[in-house]
Image: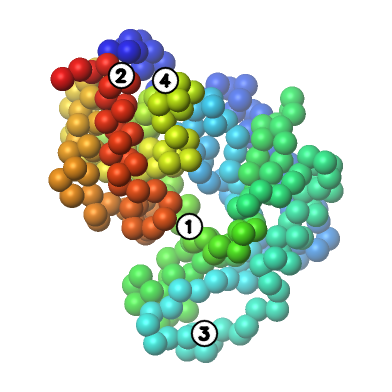
Amino acid sequence: MKYSEQTLQKWTAPLSQTEEQRANNAIKMIKTAINENENLKSMEIEVFTQGSYANNTNVRAESDVDVCVMLKDIFHEKYPEGKKREDYGFDAADMTFRQYRDLIKKALQDKFQADYVYDGNKSLKINENTYHVQADVVPAFQLRNYYYWGSTDPNKYIEGTWFVAKDGKEVSNYPKRHIKNGVNKNNATNYKYKKLVRIMKHIKNNMVEDKMADRNKITSFLVECLVYQIPNNIITGCSTWTETVRQAIIFLYNEIDEGRHKEWCEVSDMLYLFRGIKWTDLDAKQWLYDAWNYLEYGE
């Protein structure tokens, strides 16, 4: 085995208190920037963390924070077939998403200084300093998914987020459901699920550094979603992390190899894992094969 049991055990730990404080400083400053802005303070905006920081599955190599700034006065809808806005009594919005994103960018620049804030494709980037970590701020409209339940009640929907990336692509996510489902699985596995996620992320990051994996094909988000598919009894059934990782790779590889992965979803359980263009099952299978050899498990 390439890594000792002690190393794997060390990798199960969350961020240090120092990194945690710098992350909290960034979040607090972002919330202040929104609350103090004259153009935004009258709007109903919810600011919350998402991604690996919010899910408590981050490792040192990804110690930045992902913060969603979600507008609820204006929302994007996903209706059941045949239904439209008028059926729910909604009016058309008078602000475009681009206008909203520009307002958030200006508010952040006023707080953090203009040269600290710049455009990414999906998020606004805030550079780190000694006081706070780097932050990805995602302006978004609230997503109301009426389609999932076939709801015709304006107040009965699944909440998500929706935004338009700089390249024009529309993006829908369900970060709050992701967090909830992750907590539930962690509780059901005696708190081993998130520890295993951190171990697998460390392995992935080391493989990227050693040119054994492509960070664009095997992302930390994908790793977390793959670990989510592993049955609870496999996560809890081994006495060592060395054996847990071994059984995790065997399970995931065999499921993909035998085609039993087609119904796998992201941790939110709202979006299929391998039916879009983000990742492919072949890339995931290849990574698992390479990880097995990288970790020197042998035959």
Q: In the displayed structure, does residue 215 sit left or right of residue 41? A: left
Please give the name of the residue rendered at 41% of the width and 31% of the height, measured from the top-left corner.
213
Which residue is at a point 45% across and 25% down the rendered structure image?
A: 211
In the rendered image, residue 51, in percent from the top left (x then y), is placed at 51, 43
Residue at label 2?
A: 295
Q: Marks 2 and 3: CB-CB under 8 Å?
A: no
Position of residue 127 in the picture relative to residue 222 (left or right): right
Identify the mark nearer the N-term, 3 or 1. 3
User: Between marks 3 and 4, how big is the CA–CA gap?
Assistant: 49 Å
| Relative vertical location of residue 212 with respect to residue 75 in this rendering, above or below | above
Residue under the image location 34 percent in, 52 percent down: 273
Q: Secondary structure at mark 3?
A: helix
Residue 187 at x, y percent in the picture:
32, 37
User: Which of labels 2 and 1 is toward the front?
Assistant: 2
Q: Quadrant of the C terminus?
A: top left
Mark nearer the N terminus (1 vs 4): 4
Q: Which residue is mark 4?
A: 11
Give the class, few, some or many, for how many residues have Cα within 10 Å of label 2's Cα (few <14, many ≥20).
Answer: some
Q: Which numbered mark, 2 or 3, is in the foreground of this view?
A: 2
Q: Name the residue that disc number 3 marks.
A: 85
- The residue under label 1 is 173
Disc 1 + disc 4, Cβ < 8 Å: no
Q: Amino acid at mark 3?
A: Arg
For residue 70, say whether it is visible: no
Q: Considering the numbered disc 4 on the image, is that residue within a helix, a strand or a loop?
A: helix
Q: Secondary structure at mark 2?
A: loop
Three-letter residue code for mark 4? Trp
The relative height of residue 209 versus residue 25 in the rendered view (above or below) is: above
| Residues at marks 2 and 3, CA–CA distance in whole angstroms | 53 Å
**Residue 136 visible in this rendered orientation of the protein:** yes
Q: Nearer the viewer, mark 4 or mark 2?
A: 2
